[in-house]
Amino acid sequence: MSRTRHLFLFDQTGRRLAEVASGSWDFKHGHVLKRHSHPEDQLLYAAEGTMAVDTDQGIWVVPPLRAVWIPAETFHGVTMSGRVSMRTLYFLPKLCKSLPRRCLVINVSSLLKELIVHACNFPKLRRRVSAERNIIDLIVDQLKVVESIPVQLPHPHDPRARKLVEKLFADPSNQRPLHDLCSESGASKRTMQRLFVEETGMSFSKWRQRLRLISAMQRLAAGEAVTTVALECGYNSPSAFIAMFRNQLGMTPTRYLSGGLQQID
């Protein structure tokens, strides 16, 4: 696995260049950014399309008009679903003290969206420049009140649970009961249930439902029809799939595809 390191706010000697840096890129469907890390905190915003951020801890899916927070030194890769327009900000560590030292996907308010887009006009933002300091302060203030959304899928670490997880990643529509899956993974059903709760914070059934949701989000972003996605993600009917989608994300798949209308103001 390729693991590289990128620098955005520091030079090769470790000297700080600014408090915030920005980047804007457009990608085609299926493009993958290989695993890398950087010494800065990162806010990765999906202006268009869907991104899946993969770390050693799990997968975070970033729907349109949402963002993912990636703490400094976190090795991560990014996979694009559909055409993706990415906007990203890199922060000096500890500048955004309200956000945790773990990844999370957040709703982006209308004001924060405009601030991110505006900040991307500046390769670097420095507090010593008055106009740039104002932008930094507004963004940091907005990040203090963000709401997270449940589109992360934690990875279990036990090798028996990882073996089961690999099977389900290969086929999210797999309907086999846990007992059958466990017989091929070297653990009893009871042991596997305990491992998922202890290592992911989710029951196995909730974890499998989240896997199907994430798979569906990526396929919808790639342009597949709702009916096709519903059936191939293991649901008996499109209506059952839509009900699950609304229950998890508070909107229908169609609304999701349009970027949702749930931005907080």
Image: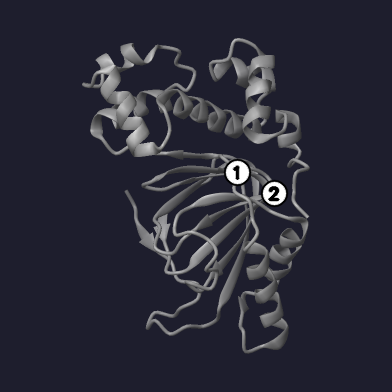
Residue at the spot x=45%, y=71% of the render?
7
Q: Amino acid at mark 1?
A: Ile
Camera-nearest residue between 60 and 88: 60
Q: Position of residue 15 (x, y in %)?
A: 43, 85
Crowding at dot 1, Cα within 10 Å, few <14 / some 14-19 / many 20+, comes out as: some
Camera-nearest residue between 203 and 67: 203
Name the residue carrying label 1.
Answer: 149
Residue at the spot x=29%, y=18% of the render?
189
Up the image or down, 246 lies above or below 58; here it is: above
Camera-nearest residue between 29 and 171: 171
Question: Where, quadrant-wise, is the C terminus in this rendering?
Answer: bottom right
* Disc 2 element: loop
Up the image or down, 25 lies above or below 40; here it is: above
* Disc 1 element: loop
Q: Tag 2 or tag 1, which sits nearer the N-term?
A: 2
* In this rendering, position of residue 216 left or right of residue 157: right
* In this rendering, position of residue 49 left or right of residue 187: right
Q: CB under 8 Å between callouts 1 and 2?
A: no
Decide if residue 128 is in sight here.
Answer: yes
Mark 1 vs mark 2, CA separation in Å: 12 Å
Q: Amino acid at mark 2?
A: Leu
Decide if residue 33 is in sight here.
Answer: no
Q: Position of residue 70 (x, y in %)?
A: 49, 57
The way the protein has been coloured in the rendering is: one colour
Name the residue carrying label 2.
Answer: 65
